[in-house]
Image (cartoon, rainbow, N blue to C red):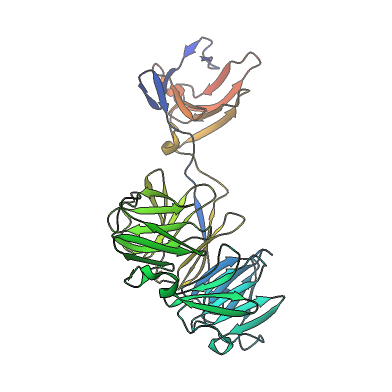
Amino acid sequence: MRVIPPQHKRTFQFSRACAGVLLGGLLACAVATAQPKYQFDHWTTDDGLPQNAVNAILQTRDGYLWLATFDGLVRFDGRQFTVFNKSNTKGIGSNRFDLLFEDRHSTLWAVTEENWLIKYQASVFTTYTPKEGLPPWVIPQIEEDEAGNLQIVSREGIAKWKDGRFVASPLKDLMPASADAKWINGNRLAWLAAGNLYLYTHGRLSVYSIQSGLPSLNIASVVEDQHGTIWINTWDAGLVRVKDGRLTAYPVKDLSGKLVSAQEDRKGKIWLIWGNILAQFKDGRLTRYLAFPGFLYSGNISFYEDREDNFWIGASTGLYRVREAAINVFTRREGLSSDNVYSIYEDRAGQLWFGTWGDGVTKFKEGCATHYWAKEAPYWNFVSTLYEDPAGYMWIGVRSHDIVD
């Protein structure tokens, strides 16, 4: 690269070094990608929530965000909270909500702390209790089976919604393997028996063992994300993803304790919540983003990704939104020769050039950061401007040696 300083009419060659190493003739360069930064927003009763404990989150097909709280169902449009409870809405028999589910017919179902089921369809709420035929079971999950039938699933049995009523079957009759079950903590129907892990979800019973690829049977918890992916948190072998019947192990060494929530987002990043920690796992690395003050462990902590790629967290301390910041910052960590950038230029080939104050020039090409600096005249590493002429030469304006700091 030819450089002609304005006060020295002669040619000067910058030295060059790539931010990488030469291995067998292949150049491994620093990737020019800034790590995503995230913005955190928080809503509480001061902002319109009826109660700070947000136990479940769901975005329905009409775009609204629904929240299950201990003082009613809440509909959120991004600005205003609308509360539905038994004091202001006909058909609601309880204010204390735990779970949310939307079926394929756009009907919203909510499970209460009393293990009642409330249906919201065509702007009408209906409460189902044992008086209406609902089995008197603890309801850890609500889902649709493979045929599209709504069902509630518990350790006592499975009840399907058919023709306006619930048809219940005891679990021991449906799955004899559950008779000697060692139940696993979590919101799914999961148990250990005879050296196997049994998972029942969406009308299907799956069996996994060490022989079939499960790295450990020392299991702390099992959770399912909003996309139907099962996450198995082991005490000694990290995290295991079960997707479309296939197992993938992630040796997350820093994941201690019981997993509260796990989810793979649309960009392939795995988000984890355990204890009071929110973290991201990608490429074998665990990055902790936030430890919520007062964000204590609770089985009702929820994590949800909406259609605009925002992440929502429901906790005992309110509603949190995690969204990627609109501005990413490039620093030395991302390959720049200096954090003090004075000029930026994109040449005709689409390469980005950064002139720094004291550390020469950095060029980014196809993810490779190449640094240029002047050994013979260090003061020329103070770059103030960049320009590419019609012939393709890059002109660099630098500080003159007679300027004193």
Q: In terms of depth relative to the viewer, which is nearer, 152 or 84?
A: 152
Q: Is residue 165 above or below residue 405?
A: below
Residue 46 shows in the view: no
Q: Is residue 272 above or below residue 400?
A: below
Q: Is residue 388 left or right of residue 40?
A: right
Q: Is residue 33 left or right of residue 122?
A: left
Residue farthest top in this picture: 10
Q: Residue at x 56, y 62 (%)?
A: 146
Q: Is residue 364 left or right of residue 254?
A: right
**Residue 328 image offset from top left, x and y in percent:** 52, 44
Residue 79 shows in the view: yes
Q: Is residue 206 above or below residue 165?
A: above
Q: Residue at x 46, y 81 (%)?
A: 137
Q: In terms of depth relative to the viewer, which is nearer, 317 or 171?
A: 171
Quarter residue 62 falls in: bottom right
**Residue 253 image offset from top left, x and y in percent:** 30, 51
Q: Residue at x 56, y 57 (%)?
A: 310
Quarter residue 24 falls in: top left
Quarter occupied by the C terminus: top left
Q: In terms of depth relative to the viewer, which is nearer, 261 or 366?
A: 261
Residue farthest right in this picture: 122
Q: In terms of depth relative to the viewer, which is nearer, 46 or 343?
A: 46
**Residue 171 image offset from top left, x and y in percent:** 43, 74
Numbered marks: total: 0
**Residue 6 image offset from top left, x and y in percent:** 55, 17
